[in-house]
Amino acid sequence: MTDHPDRPPLSGITVVSLEQAVAAPFATRQLADLGARVIKVERPGGGDFARRYDTTVHGQSSYFVWLNRSKESVTLDLKSNAGRTVLERLLDRADVFVQNLAPGAVARMGFGAEALAERFPSLIPCSISGYGADGPWADRKAYDLLVQCQTGLVSLTGNEHGSARVGVSIADIAAGMYAYSGILTALFTRATTGTARAVEVSLFEALAEWVSQPAYYTRHGGTQPPRIGTQHATIAPYGAYACADGKEVLFTVQNEREWAALCEHFLQRPDLVGDQRFATTSDRVAHRAELNGIVAARFGELDSEAATRLLDRAGLANAGVNDIAEFLAHPVLGARGRWRSVRIPGGSTVPALLPPVDLAGTVPRMDGVPAAGEHTSSVLAELGYGTADIESLSTEHAI
């Protein structure tokens, strides 16, 4: 019997999104991966400003290509009555409305959550903000790095020489993930109870959840975890060490059995097993400097392949510290067939990773990245606009 994949799980769900930058597009792209129809509403004359963050992917922005596959792009001037009328008609057919515009912008246009609940009781609105819809910072601008700073994350990242930002847009990603899971929860709630509930996520509160462990450590320990690069604040040895060939290898010891294995099989110092300076995890953290001197000296005697081989034989978790080029060539991604080709504006195709969640019996959607306004005419035609109407809207610069 031939195994035919099931329909994508969100087939039949329509999402309309007034989105820009990273957080909201990340949430809606994941909905599109699952088969939802995502209609991305952009500004006429350029669209989402993330399209211009860089031009490294055959002239397209690396951010935009990552975040916007499998969507339809419609350009609307929402400052015009005609543009707002089109949005109203789109929402009348939609299941989900996502927006991450400036604080208060959608409410001023008449599309706030309360107003939408009255006109479209089955619509699930999702709002992504910087610091929440109310409170003392509701109107404050919030970008990813600002939120990394406000949550204390930057103070945890880096080394003794200074702090550093996390190298990806982690606040945006956190908010996008919670928006995505919140929308799925709201869709389930609507399906089981008939009630459409609004979803609200802020970048600040999403990332605040992710720094909860160091927050507990600080509140109850009196000091925050130290900024120590790839080392771990509460476990030792745990970090990256330079090998004789210049490549760094990171490894960790999680318990006393692994500590003994490290001493005997890697360090070749069985005498250290009984050394009271290193008897427990807490002892090893307290004597981190002495321990690091011993470990670093041994790594300096070995090239990275030899070091990895010995750590593997000792049963210790380890990994080479890859750069991005090495990640792109990673054998796991190739052997597991995780790459697919995706079309981008201009006609080129680029490799893109499959979504990380595999759902048995289904195939993720991996359609192209739209050009700004690519689907405006076809979507308007679905809404009942004729050719003359569309030309008139274009002349008025409403689309």
Image (cartoon, rainbow, N blue to C red):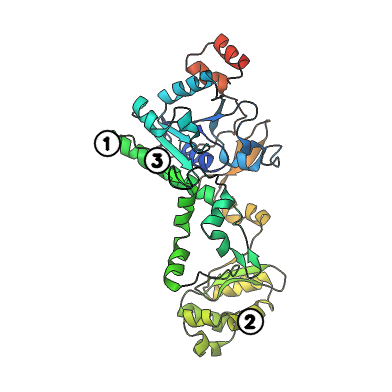
Instruction: Sort mark 2 into few (<14), some (14-19) or many (20+) by Cα contacts within 10 Å.
Output: few
Q: Which residue is mark 3?
A: 199
Q: Position of residue 236 (x, y in %)?
A: 53, 76
Marker disc for residue 293: 2
- Depth check, front residue: 181 or 48: 48
| Amino acid at circle 3 | Val
- Dot 3 falls on a residue whose secondary structure is strand
Location of residue 200 by image quarter: top left
Asked if residue 315 lies left or right of residue 323, the reply is left
Density class for disc 3 (Cα within 10 Å; few <14, some 14-19, many ≥20) is: many
Cα–Cα span, label 3 and label 2: 51 Å
Mark 2: amino acid? Gly
Say which residue label 1 marks: 193
Q: Is residue 285 visible?
A: yes
Q: Residue shown at 34%/27% (left/top)?
A: 118
- Assign a secondary structure to mark 2: helix
Single out the mark in the foreground, 1 or 3.
Answer: 3
